[in-house]
Amino acid sequence: MNDLETSRQSEIPQTKPSKPKKPKRQLSERTIGYLLVSPALILIFAIAIWPVLQSFYFSLFDLRLNDPTKSSVNLNYSIDLDRYLSNYPFLIGGIESEIRNGNAVDELEEVKEKLQTLNQQIQTDPGAAEKYEAVNEKLNNFERVPDHLKLVEIEQQTSQNYLETIKGIQKDLDALRGQNEFKNIDKIVGLSNGLDDAIIKPNFIGFEHYQNNLTDKRMWKALANTVTFTVISVFIELVIGLAIALLINKAFFGRGLIRASILIPWAIPTAVSALMWRYLYDGQNGIIAKIFAEVGLVDEMSSLLTTSTGAMFSVIFTDVWKTIPYMALLILAGLQTIPKSLYEAAAIDGANKWKQFITITLPLLKTSILVALLFRTLDAFRVFDLIFVLTGGGPANSTETISILAYTVMFSQTNFGEGSALSVIVFICVAIISAIFIKLLGSELIKDGSAK
Amino acid sequence: MQKKAGPLFYVFLFLFVFVVMFPFLWMLITSIKPMSELFGEKAFMPFTDNPTFKNYASVFLDYPFLNYLWNSFVVASITTIYTVFVASFAAYAIARLNFKGKPIILGIVLSVSMFPQIATISPIYIILKNLGLTNSYLGLIIPYTTITLPLSIWILVTFFRKIPFDLEEAARMDGASLLQTYWRVILPLAVPGIFTTAILVFIAAWNEFLFALTINTAEKYKTVPVGIAMFQGQYTIPWGEISAATVVVTIPLVIMVLFFQRRIVSGLTSGSVKE
């Protein structure tokens, strides 16, 4: 209270005569509201929404990180001056030295002339001229060429001309190679091949990745695996989770301990628990594999991780083990909000336990269950670490989910364009799932509680 | 519902907890077995005659495991502090102030929390690579915002809404400005909620796998989940060390969960239950 009073006093103008007080009070609640929300919104936009849009944009390009001519998004023809100027002068030099040695003088003179005409063309290209000099200077001083200088957009005409000329020169050189004794022919051919890569073609391909993916068996298999995994594991989790929540919804000794112990599978990193289960499922030394084999759940220990049904079963079993606690807790929290008086009234009316469950518990739990289902379904649908560590998507892609496939395409095959297309497909699926759930939930999820 | 819990109930409870905990207990046993007892018939023995701590020593001496722990700790802590800080303002505004577009903002937050990480990874990876931020702490802290910020706003809004409005009105009557009310009245009352959020955000950041796997590939910057998942022996998978490492990561989490279970549960269930 004292603090409040002093602060109130400080706002009376006389106490601070020199400075005019900032018009803090005039900021309306609305403005402050927007101000407070804006940092979070900006961050969310920059780190989540924009990348998703960018993913979509990438998916329209043939983007490959390990291929220098396709490593970025290019809408137009351009020339990599760094690459060009690292090759061109040496190529000319090499040709000149062969000429000096008297090898195929006429032919090489012709090649040299073609190259110089081409060089002239690039130098006089309105876009390239200035940067040409700058890059050349940097290279002469053995400095690194900054990215903004390196790439210059050029006319399609020029670039096609360029590629044709280089092709012609390569042919000429190849033809000469058989007839003469050159000193450095390999070097010269190598340099002329290097010039090829200096032209960067537009890699916009429209919806080709989507077309390819939608007709690709592997994509559909991955999608089917994802749906199988999601539906089965979420269903089992819901049924067992509900059962457990109903059972432990009573006062008993050691409640905190139980709660803590069922939280542990949830709290441990998924990757670590997946690795742990990989050991437990191990075909030779895994205790769970042994138990399952003895009980007759699987024919032999090794079939858990080496057959496709076994692997899918293992993955689902682990997911169920890990997330039942979460499910049970969410449902338990919902159960605890149901007033006891309802059950008492029902009991007086002669309703038995089952009837009470159907007419009171389930309808009142609807929201809790739907919310839990929504979050669990989405989590299961985008499953990555569990499967990546436990089976790696194998055996024979039988547990490969769509996220795993997208990761593999992006980071193992470094095909970012196609991988982005796959990730957009994941995004669309997730959007559809959430839309269905939110439709079922109505506006309850984002109701404005402050109006209460 | 039923008030009393019978003995059968406790038997069931014990079985349930045993099943849930069994994998951990087994890892604990495995971690103290000597190398020779990890394979063959002895692999299935629930005890060992020659307990050894060799696996634990190996985890810390032969692998950069301490380094992984430190990386995870740094990344998770900074992520937690900064997201909860940013989120607390946004959540306060959404929960307590009157302005237009709140349902839309909350809708955006909720939908972003549903984004699959794989859908953001290619641009984030390329941007971080161009900025030279792959293999750095910042390279993980930035993308972790996608996961943690919506989560913390979502939980905090629920907590802020629970604080009685009368207190705020009283403070305003006394002439406190909006921000003063926030700092002096609301925030102290919201500390438990903020703490709960921080625990959940910390766990989420500590456990994250996909970004950590793709962005920080250098041994020096790997986090615990990626580090353990990539444990490689020369010829076989080093299960002894892996079990020891699993135990080492699990124990702090067990302690944390034991201490904070009430808060964790309230955080997990907030927003999903109508009150």
Image (cartoon, coloured by chain):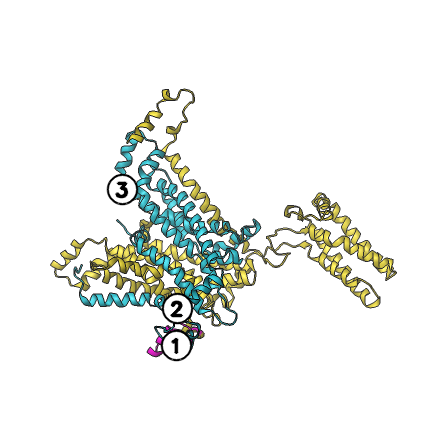
Q: CA distance from mark 2 to mark 1?
A: 13 Å
Which of the 4 image quadrants contains residue A289? Answer: bottom left
Q: Chain of mark 1?
A: B
The relative height of residue A395 versus residue A145 in the rendered view (above or below) is below
Q: Mark 2: few, some, or many residues within 10 Å (few <14, many ≥20)?
A: many
Residue A430 placed where, x, y %? 42, 57
Secondary structure category for the residue under label 3: loop
> Which quarter of the image is occupied by the C terminus of chain A?
top left
Magenta segment, which residues?
Answer: A278-305
Question: Is A218 located above or below residue A114 in the figure?
Answer: below
Rendering quarter of residue A34: top left
Question: In the rendered image of this protein, which colour is used for chain B?
Answer: cyan
Q: Residue at x 47, y 72 (%)?
A: A395
Q: Examine the rendering and report whether any part of residue A223 can be seen.
A: no
Q: Nearer the viewer, residue A301 or A382?
A: A301
Farthest residue to the right: give it: A102
- Dot 2 falls on which chain? B
Which residue is label 2 attached to? B32
Q: Colour of chain A?
A: yellow
B218 lies left or right of B148? right
* Mark 3 or 1, closer to the camera: 1
* Subunit bearing disc 3: A
Mark 3 highlights which residue?
A452
**Alpha-carbon neighbours of circle 3 within 10 Å: few (<14), some, or many (≥20)?**
few
Count all numbered tags in the image, as a single digit: 3
Determine the secondary structure under disc 2: loop
Q: Between disc 2 and disc 1, whose residue precedes?
A: 2
